[in-house]
């Protein structure tokens, strides 16, 4: 499977990657064979034959290009050299401002894009605070038979869109609203993007894993937008976008007082944990229990679900670390019994994160794809996976109860 280029890829780094692959081959490292099988002459060759063959630098450069979905090194080089430079409100910049403790896979492109837009609008907020205060780090939507509850929408109507409105909450608290253009109307999107890129206004997107649109161009008769995203970034034809929407923030009112935002965020955290089913799909703690039931069920086949379905599930679980960090900060801002209860909730969510991290490690460190989850669910190991999830859910339940007590005395 091909991978997307990293954010703002560096050609020298890619050249070094090719040289490392060549050195691994010449050193007899069998791990190099899985990459070199992308070359037609090695497609079905055993490791011994590949390691005994002479391989040139040009060939391993082509392997690197193929790895990222390009037919040649020249095409890869052209694409890298044509990408815009990173700006102060790029996804890269948001990640750099995050705590080093941010767990792998806790971030998704949509919330990273909203954080960038909020910082551009003068709201000093990092990813971990946004993930928690928005409710993202306390939410979970799951239904094995329908992947739609895992969608990560930017803007939504709470009455109609259920969990999709999760990323609208904080911007509205800070006095912003969303301007929108639907990608089903390419001409409208093209004009929308041109105007805002030229004005240096961040543009968020729900396409793939979201992120920011930071540039536009016309090339070979095609209108293209540059996605600064954690998944599927790079230049994408405006006519090929998924029929969702692109957004920018606009200031429409004054922000609420900090203590009001804090209380609303704590109430929201409880609400996301206790959320009612949405279109028959369980939410919050109920969704976590449904996930536990299916992971424990040997008849379920996770290899048949889409890759991003498991990514979405793991991103939510890893975001519990963001909940812990934010709650510890909130505990230092409130007084009396509320402080004690928020501190307890922080500890509980920290325990939940550790349990989910052990669960992820059992599945396999790295991208949590469905086939890896399915392979990990052997008869001998299902009980181990089940216990890690069970411990995490119990810790979250206790954390939610502590938050309910905190909100009651604030």
Image: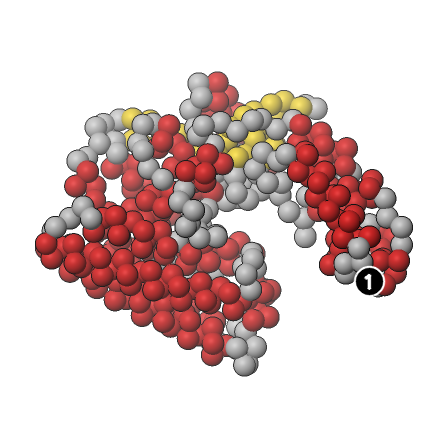
Image vertical order of residue 347 relative to residue 116, above or below: below
Neighbours of disc 1 within 10 Å: few (<14), some (14-19), many (20+):
some
SS for callout 1: helix
Please name the colour scheme applied to the rendered image.
Answer: secondary structure
- The answer to whether 228 appears left or right of 251 in the picture is right
Residue at the outermost bottom position: 380
Residue 12 spot, x, y in % from top left? 68, 34
- The answer to whether 394 appears left or right of 199 in the picture is left
> In the figure, residue 318 lies in which quadrant?
bottom left
Q: Residue at x 38, y 72 (%)?
A: 390
- Judge by depth and name the residue closer to the eye, 265 or 166: 265
- Judge by depth and name the residue closer to the eye, 68 or 18: 18
Q: Would you name the residue on which mark 1 appears?
A: 47
Residue 203 spot, x, y in % from top left? 45, 30
Q: Residue at x 80, y 58 (%)?
A: 28
Residue at the outermost front position: 27
> In the figure, residue 371 lies in which quadrant?
bottom right
Residue 311 spot, x, y in % from top left? 50, 55
Image vertical order of residue 305 relative to residue 222, above or below: below
- The answer to whether 148 appears left or right of 176 in the picture is right
Q: Residue at x 35, y 32 (%)?
A: 118
Image vertical order of residue 189 relative to residue 73, above or below: above
Can residue 85 be seen from the camera position used here? yes
Can residue 163 be seen from the camera position used here? no
């Amino acid at each position: 499977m091909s991978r997307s280029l990293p954010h703002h890829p560096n050609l020298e780094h890619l050249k070094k990657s090719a040289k490392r692959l060549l050195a691994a081959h010449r050193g007899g490292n069998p791990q190099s064979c899985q990459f070199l099988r992308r070359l037609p002459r090695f497609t079905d060759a055993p490791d011994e034959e590949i390691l005994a063959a002479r391989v040139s630098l040009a060939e391993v450069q082509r392997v690197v290009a193929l790895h990222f979905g390009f037919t040649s090194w020249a095409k890869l080089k052209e694409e890298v050299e044509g990408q815009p430079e990173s700006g102060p409100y790029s996804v890269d910049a948001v990640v750099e401002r995050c705590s080093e403790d941010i767990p792998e896979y806790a971030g998704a492109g949509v919330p990273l894009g909203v954080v960038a837009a909020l910082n551009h609008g003068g709201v000093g907020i990092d990813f971990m605070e946004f993930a928690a205060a928005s409710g993202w780090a306390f939410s979970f939507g799951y239904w094995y038979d329908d992947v739609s509850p895992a969608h990560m929408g930017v803007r939504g109507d709470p009455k109609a869109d259920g969990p999709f409105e999760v990323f609208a909450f904080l911007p509205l608290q800070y006095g912003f609203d969303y301007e929108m253009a639907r990608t089903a109307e390419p001409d409208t999107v093209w004009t929308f993007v041109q105007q805002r890129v030229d004005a240096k206004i961040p543009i968020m997107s729900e396409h793939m894993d979201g992120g920011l649109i930071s540039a536009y161009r016309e090339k070979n008769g095609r209108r293209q937008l540059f996605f600064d995203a954690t998944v599927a970034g790079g230049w994408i034809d405006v006519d090929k976008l998924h029929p969702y929407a692109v957004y920018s923030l606009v200031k429409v009112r004054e922000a609420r007082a900090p203590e009001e935002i804090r209380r609303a965020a704590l109430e929201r955290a409880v609400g996301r944990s206790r959320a009612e089913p949405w279109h028959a799909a369980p939410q919050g703690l109920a969704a976590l229990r449904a996930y536990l039931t299916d992971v424990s069920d040997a008849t379920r086949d996770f290899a048949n679900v889409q890759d991003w379905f498991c990514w979405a599930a793991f991103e939510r679980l890893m975001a519990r670390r963001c909940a812990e960090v934010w709650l510890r900060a909130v505990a230092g801002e409130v007084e009396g019994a509320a402080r004690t209860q928020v501190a307890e909730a922080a500890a509980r969510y920290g325990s939940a994160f550790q349990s989910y991290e052990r669960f992820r490690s059992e599945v396999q460190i790295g991208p949590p794809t469905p086939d890896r989850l399915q392979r990990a669910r052997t008869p001998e190991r299902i009980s181990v996976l089940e216990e890690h999830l069970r411990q995490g859910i119990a810790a979250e339940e206790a954390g939610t109860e502590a938050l309910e007590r905190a909100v009651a005395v604030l």
